[in-house]
Image (tube, coloured by chain):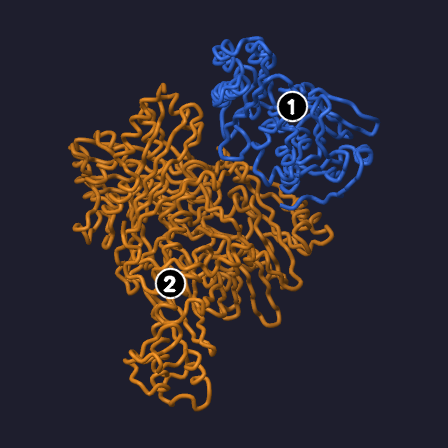
Amino acid sequence: MKAAPFDHHAPESVADAAALLAEHGDEAKVLAGGQSLLPMLAMRLTRFEHLVDVSRVPELHGITTDGDLRIGASTPQAVAEHDPVVADAVPLVARAIPHIGHFQIRNRGTVGGSIAHADPASELPAVALALDAVLEVAGATGTREIAATDFFEGTWSTALADDEILTGVRFPVWTGRQGAAVREVARRSGDFAIAGVAAAVELDAADRVARVAVGLFGVASTPVRASATEAALTGASVAEATAALADAALAAADGFDAVDDLHATGAYRRRVTTHLVQTALTAAIQEASGVRA
Amino acid sequence: MSDHGIGAGRYVGQAVQRKEDPRLLTGHGRYVDDVTVPRMLHAAFVRSDLAAATIRSIDVSEALALDGVVAVLTGHDLNGIAGSMQPSMNVENSPFPCAPLRPLAVTDVRFVGDPVALVVAESRAVAEDAAELVFVDYEPTPAVATIEAALADGAPLVHPEFGTNVPVDFPMPADPEVEALFASAAHVVEHRIVQHRYNPVPMEPRGVIAGYDNVTGELDVWLSTQGPHEARLTFSRLTGVPEQHVRVRMGDVGGGFGQKFFTGHDEQVVVLAAKHLGRAIKWIEDRRENLLAATHSRSDLADVALALDADGRILAAKFDHVEDAGAFPVGGLGGVGPFVSMLFPGPYRIPKIWWRSRIVCTNTCGRGAYRGPWMFETTAREEILDVAARAVGIDPREIRRINVVADDDQPYNTATGMMFERVTPATTLEHATQVIDYDGFRATQAAAFAEGRLLGIGIGLYIEPTSSPAGSLGVEAAKVRLEPGGSVTVFLGTAAHGQSIETTMAQVVAEHLGVPYEQVAVIQGDTDRTPFGGGTGGSRTAVIAGNATRLAAQRVREKVVEVAAHLLEAAPEDLEVADGRVAVRGTPSRAVTLAEVATAVHNVGGVAVDVPRVLEATGRYETQGMTWSNACHVCTVEVDRVTGQVTIGRYVVSEDCGRMINPMVVEGQVQGGVAQGVGGVLYEHFVYDDDGNPLTTTFLDYLLPTAVEVPRVEIDHVVTDGGNPSGVKGMGEGGAIGSVPAVFNAVADALSLVGATVLDQPLTPLRVVEALEAAGA
């Protein structure tokens, strides 16, 4: 389990990182926290001639709020997990991160790395998708923004070009009364989810569901947004939403091509997804409406 | 509940702190990978990625051309110079055919992971780079990946040398009495029970450093092992280097669980390569190799049948067992085989039994020992007992009470020829079920079920064979030496890899020689320094090495007393040794220290000529037949009806391992074994597809239980003298045996509430959900 030889580059600016990517093309890969890439390299499941290590690029670190919550791509997951600004602005992010692996992994793993790696069983891509996050990207020729909806193309595959680097993610901040919950089923504590749900609910002044976001992970080849579930609940009163939850959760399980693998069948994933959507939304609605669980 | 301290002394029987703790708990253990020898090279294997194939050609030219590569060895280089690769047990007296071992595959490969070439280079990284440049041209051939496939008519042969995939088939003759009992029984239950494949998975994978000196002819080996003396014999036979010129050393070993008891195939290849090249070579197995090609374990099935009377009393049994040996088992075919059938009756009165034992080969990684290698007898028996209880309509505890071997049944001869004595299965059954409040749990279970929740309770009751009288494994020698300063060194042929032997054997010496525990050091793991011994495995150290150590310590004490009697001008029988001092009984001021005794012996004129001049002694102990220990595991679970996930509630073990040397060490062994059994039932599964391709070669897919998944074990001790001088019994393996049916039966019990049935392990969430769905629940 030794990686094939590679050159390690440690640029100190996004521009330098982008230039390195442009220079080496598909022979280069961005190295963030290394929690996914390094095992794959060590097992020689993948190989790159050049690793562009972005962990020491200052402008990729940091958490700010300016309308949106912006998290720099190289910010360690553990930093975001424990940042009061994150917990206050976008609770769903703060509640999703503890489900990522184990704390040692979160100390090294980065917010941007998790999103750019685009493992369909990861929590943050589903959160980004559900919350309509915007992904900030830089390349040698400039910067652009990609809506999360357009970002996740397949397992470990995104809209990022070979010479582009994810620089940050912006999550919209909800200002109404809200609740957020993450529920997942994994074989063991800390494992990749067999099925998982990240859900947030915002109520308006009339106690009706103003916004609802439901992201599914671990169930298909990409993170999945449970749009039918969201549509069924949006505009409903708390009582109506609660009554409609069971059907709305069933709709979530119909909205994706479930994967079969060693640990679960697609049918199992649908069964469990229905249950998780219902429990997560129940918790989120209760929190938003001030009910203590 | 019972007195931990029966027979306890000043040190023996006490939970003294472990001598191993300071270095191991602070991360300062020294393992084979921490050892560096001068001019050491590094090796990497090229392994087959096909389960069965003919080799058309092997091209090593590109690999050899890579900078830093010293050699790329194939079977053409090594196979012709290799001696036997079999363990001593098979060389001396194998009742079964031995797998056709060869260092490296030349004509064909027989499992995914089968070594084809060995790259030797200046670094491991270069060796792995070069390994990718070895091109093997294979012609794939059909493979058999399962027991059923191997048994099928016309199945491809794993080993053409055998002419069959069933090299061992040992059936008892048909027994009309058994048939008659089945024909007339009030209840007959029949069930195919499958024990899926899971592995020892030591935290430290295998590893070796071998160096050969062309001038002195000495072969010097560092090895991660459970038995350096056996390894030395193996390497001598393999390389032709005379045994007196082979030295095997081990440092700390990060677990073995049986995998390192016999000397593995790959370690042997590295040693042979070192001899061939005349260079020192290090090979440290990586995790993927360990999962793929070290040894696999479990993988059994049996068609089991019980005939019972109307009350649930067992009248007869049938046990038709098939063991999967894989392609190249380590330790030999039939290492366990028929023993499983012979132990099948376990702690129950089963008057008549018919059994058949088969061993099949498959195109999979070879089977190796794993903590309780025979444990399928317990899985099969305890699982079918619960099936029988439900068929008869009585509680699983009740069917055990009806059939268990009682104290006054002993000595008890089983229908398979085992003789049990000094065992307490009935007592441990009662204790364990009392501690867990079995009756109270049944009430809790009913109340929870009224709310729709599925709780269950399961029992695993077994008798554990320890300190087997098998050839050289039934004997140990220990040497104890009083050092000039009054401290004591113990030299043992054991090979601790997690058993706390430095602690327990120091306790034995401190007790029986009369010195402070802190002044005793235990040396193991070096064939140049320690007496020959069978290594650590088979739950043999406490009984065999322990009694040998006790005897050696007593003999040194006798010598010490004799010298002290001269120095104190007292009669030996008036002296007592304690705290490193020899004193006249009743007159503590008349005393000499052990240092003074040693000084007298080591200096001119210090003692009379007729007293012992060497303050060391050797003790030898030969096991007096099998020492049986026993235990009862009981656990409770809750099954999530939606997700199928199993959560363990309470876990209780009542065990009888005789007099304990150190209760803390005993409890650690129980807890660790339970972790492995829980892992086996709920998480761990080495999976092959039908073509023999492994699907679980990383910890992403091969799931070990973590601290979160393993329950805290509540342990009750029953102490029955083991029938040997120190009264101990072995107990190292039982935790991994009783836990498997306890957890399985608890889940089955919970599912039975809604009429659902599970047949096979592991009990994954998916399998539980499918069982619930099949039952319409």
Q: Residue type at mark 2?
A: Ser
| Residue at the (29%, 26%) spot, across then down | B446
Q: Residues within 10 Å of mark 2 (few under 14, many from 20)?
A: some
Please state the chain letter of the residue tagged with numbered disc 1 in the rendered image.
A
Depth order, front residue of B533/B403: B403
Against B123, is A248 above or below? above
- A236 to the left or right of B470: right
Picture coordinates of residue B771 (x, y %)? 38, 25
Q: Quadrant of residue B287?
A: top right
Cα distance in 3D space between marks 2 and 1: 64 Å
Against B531, is B353 above or below? above
Please state the chain letter of the residue tagged with numbered disc 2 in the rendered image.
B
Q: Quadrant of residue B311?
A: top left
| Residue at the (50%, 64%) spot, across then down | B236
Identify the disc placed on residue A128: 1
Give the residue pinned by disc 2: B472
- Answer yes or no: is residue B314 visible: yes
- Answer yes or no: is residue B360 visible: no
Position of the C terminus of chain B, as image quadrant, is top left
- B201 to the left or right of A169: left
Task: Look at the numbered disc 1 and give the secondary structure of its residue.
Answer: helix
Task: Look at the numbered disc 2 and give the secondary structure of its residue.
Answer: helix
Mark 2 or 1, closer to the camera: 1
- A24 to the left or right of B478: right
Q: Residue type at mark 1?
A: Ala
In the picture, which chain is orange?
B
Q: Residues within 10 Å of mark 1 (few under 14, many from 20)?
A: many
Picture coordinates of residue B558 (x, y %)? 33, 77
Depth order, front residue of B335/B156: B335
Q: What colour is chain A?
A: blue
